[in-house]
Image: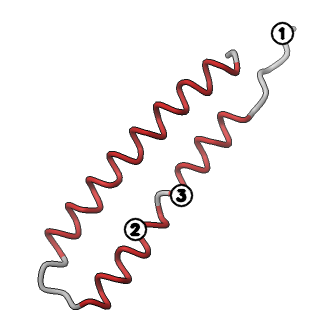
Amino acid sequence: MPIRLKKLIGSILLVALVVVYALAAVTVAAGRLAEAGPLVHLFFFLVSGLLWILPAMLIIKWMQHPPRPKG
């Protein structure tokens, strides 16, 4: 697969990941943390704010792999 196509697909996947992940995190926060204290909110948003980095790293790593040589 050409590197430009991989970067296009990866960019679209990254944007979709951020949108879906943000909506999921807010939904969980609104549904589960409505009555929780401020420390629970802090911990939840700290963890959920960093957790999206793991799948994003995998997408970026996939985007950076050089194309296989044609043989």
Q: Residue at x 61, y 18 (%)?
A: 5
**Residue 53 on image: x %, y %:** 53, 57
Crowding near pointer 2: few (<14 within 10 Å), some, many (20+)? some
x, y (%) of residue 46? 42, 76
The earlier-in-sequence mark between 3 and 2 is: 2
Residue at mark 1 to residue at mark 2: CA–CA distance: 41 Å
Q: CA distance from mark 3 to mark 1?
A: 33 Å
- Please report whichever mark, 1 or 2, sits nearer to the chain's N-terminal start: 2
Q: Earlier in the sequence, mark 3 or mark 1?
A: 3
The answer to whether 19 appears left or right of 3 in the picture is left
- Residue at the disc numbered 2: 48
Residue 70's tag is: 1
Residue depicted at 63% across the width and 42% down the height: 60
Mark 3 residue type: Ile
The quadrant the N terminus occupies is top right
**Picture layout, residue 67 above or below residue 13:** above
Q: Quadrant of the C terminus?
A: top right
Mark 1: secondary structure = loop
Please report contact status of discs 3 and 1: CB closer than 8 Å, yes or no. Answer: no
**Residue 38 at x, y = what percent?**
26, 89
* Tag 3 residue: 53
